[in-house]
Image (cartoon, rainbow, N blue to C red):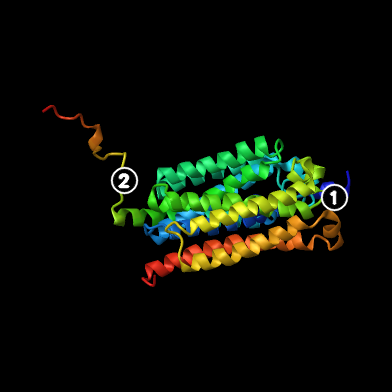
Amino acid sequence: MTDASADIQNYEPTFGDYFALLKPRVMSLVIFTALVGMLVAPVPVHPIIGFAAILFIAIGAGASGALNMWWDADIDAVMRRTAKRPVPSGRVGADEALALGVALSGLSVVMLALATNLLAAALLAFTIFFYIVVYTMWLKRLTPQNIVIGGAAGAFPPMIGWVAATGSLSVEAFAMFALIFFWTPPHFWALALFMKTDYHDAGVPMLTVTHGRRVTRNQIFTYSAVLAAVSLATGLTTLGGPAYWTAAILLNAWMMFGAFRIWRRGEAEAEGDGYKVEKKFFRFTLSYLFLLFAAFFVDALLTRLGAI
Amino acid sequence: MFARTHELHKRRLSRNVGVGLCLLGFVVLMFGLTVVKVTNGDPMQGFDHVLRPEMIPAEEN
């Protein structure tokens, strides 16, 4: 037995290792979008109920993360980006990830139902099911459209936040869903362009692997155009206001410019500057989503204060 | 007489403290939720030793 493997066998998982199973970085985006979805809803929510709802939505998202790490431990171990996660690195057993995921899934759904309403809880349950069964277990390793489909799971939180406040679905909830849904593919395909061999090594049929990098660049441009149309159309719902329109016009112009630059250039040029444009675009997409949702909130605040 | 602290307890300290704090937070949150729901008069129903109107057969007219 090597020293390293002896170390890992004697290793006692810390609280932080279990917390890392919940994918805290993904959770932070879920918390933010769900919170905005709840705050922009026309029905005010008591702060404690609102806090509980966001907490349980976040725990549900974390549970999905733990279940995802349980199922995907084999490919996580191969990819550089994910090799240090608790399960592939041996700090936490796969069975523990499964147990934690199942327990927290049940807890989050039941508690969200008790804190808010059944529809919100049902949507959370569906999100977990969709992310784990439809995306992780079924389609992720089967189709190059995996990112498009997986994006749907990430698009649910603002919708759940809205439903937690109002108790029903409406065009605004679907608009927020569509925004994240169409944002996901360009975001992840930009990542796939510069994380060159990771997905290939792991045998995940990323678009870059199955259809080539040229097609991926075309698709990034296409989805960015659809995203721009969707985000501008969202401005026509009650979510739109001066802050949103300003943000949407500026951010979409920048997004289209970035997507155009990615589309225009070839691999040789990208290799030459170390995927500078792709990396910049990837980072920008994060700000894009954050700023659009922040603008929703600013407009809702202005409306509530009677400024518009 | 308590057993002496085993080395294992030291290794698991962060985990146990973390779980303890989570449980404590959960209890506090449940209490807060209950207070808010009761004071808001949200629709709710007890199931033990309380009258449940829908269980009473409807009277014939």
Q: Name the foreground residue: B26 vs B58.
A: B58
Secondary structure under tag 2 reads loop
Q: Position of residue A206 (x, y in %)?
A: 74, 44
Residue A87 placement (x, y as % from top left): 72, 46
Say which of A113 and A197 sits in front.
A197
Depicted A151 relative to depicted A133: above or below: below
Label 2 crowd (10 A; few <14 / some 14-19 / many >=20): few
Taking depth in this image into account, of A50 and A290 the one nearest to the observer is A290
Residue A13 at x, y percent in the picture: 70, 51
- Whether A186 is drawn above or below A292: the answer is above
For residue A287, the mark is none
Q: What label does residue A4 carry, if any?
A: 1
Q: Which residue is mark 2?
A: B44
Write down the quadrant of residue A93 in the picture: top right
Q: Amino acid at mark 2?
A: Met
Chain bearing mark 2: B
Q: Which structural element holds mark 1?
A: helix
Q: Check disc 1 and give the amino acid type.
A: Ala
